[in-house]
Amino acid sequence: MTVRGFLFLLLSVCCVEAVDYRPGPEAQRRDGAPQGKVTEHSWNQCKAFPGTTRSYWVYVPAQYDGKKPANLMVFQDGGGFVREKGHTRVPIVFDNLTDKSRVGRRLTKFNLTRTYEEQGVTYNLPSSPLYFHWN
């Protein structure tokens, strides 16, 4: 294959429209499955990066009563994972899997990117603390 043919093939593949992703059956609400609760919080007490505010959500399954320890799962950049109409719909998936006893009860934290306010202007920053080292 010539270089020109290879480049044509590469560009053709890159220009093909992406397949429309549809969440699977576990990501659909099921009648009778207990629904956990998602609460939104923010934290602005960071000593390493003063002035930053971090948003996060916590999911607690309906079956959790606090009497036994629960597992904890953390999602970085969790805003997309926590949405009920998002691409992964993690709270719905966990509701369905916990209801079927396919996974144990787990508390889940979804971290979102942080914001920084300076002179009345709010900036959205990447989640990684390395951002400050490279910029």
Image: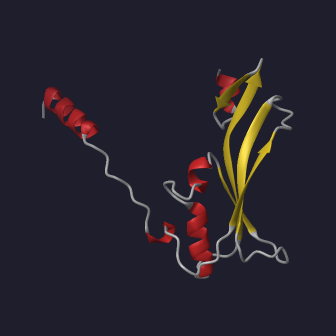
The image quarter in which residue 66 lies: bottom right
Specify the color scheme: secondary structure
Q: In percent of the image, x 20 and y 30: which residue is there?
A: 7
Residue 25, located in which quarter of the rendered image? Answer: bottom left
Q: Residue at x 75, y 25 (%)?
A: 117
124 to the left or right of 120: left
Q: Residue drawn 27% across and 43% down?
A: 17
Residue visible at 72% across and 44% down in the picture = 55
Residue 50 position in % (x across, y down): 83, 29
- Percent x, y of residue 96: 57, 74
Task: Name the quadrant of the C terminus.
Answer: top right
Residue lying at the far top of the rendered structure: 119
121 relative to 63, above or below: above
Quadrant the N terminus occupies: top left
Q: Is residue 96 left or right of residue 1?
A: right
Position of 13 relative to 35 (above/below): above
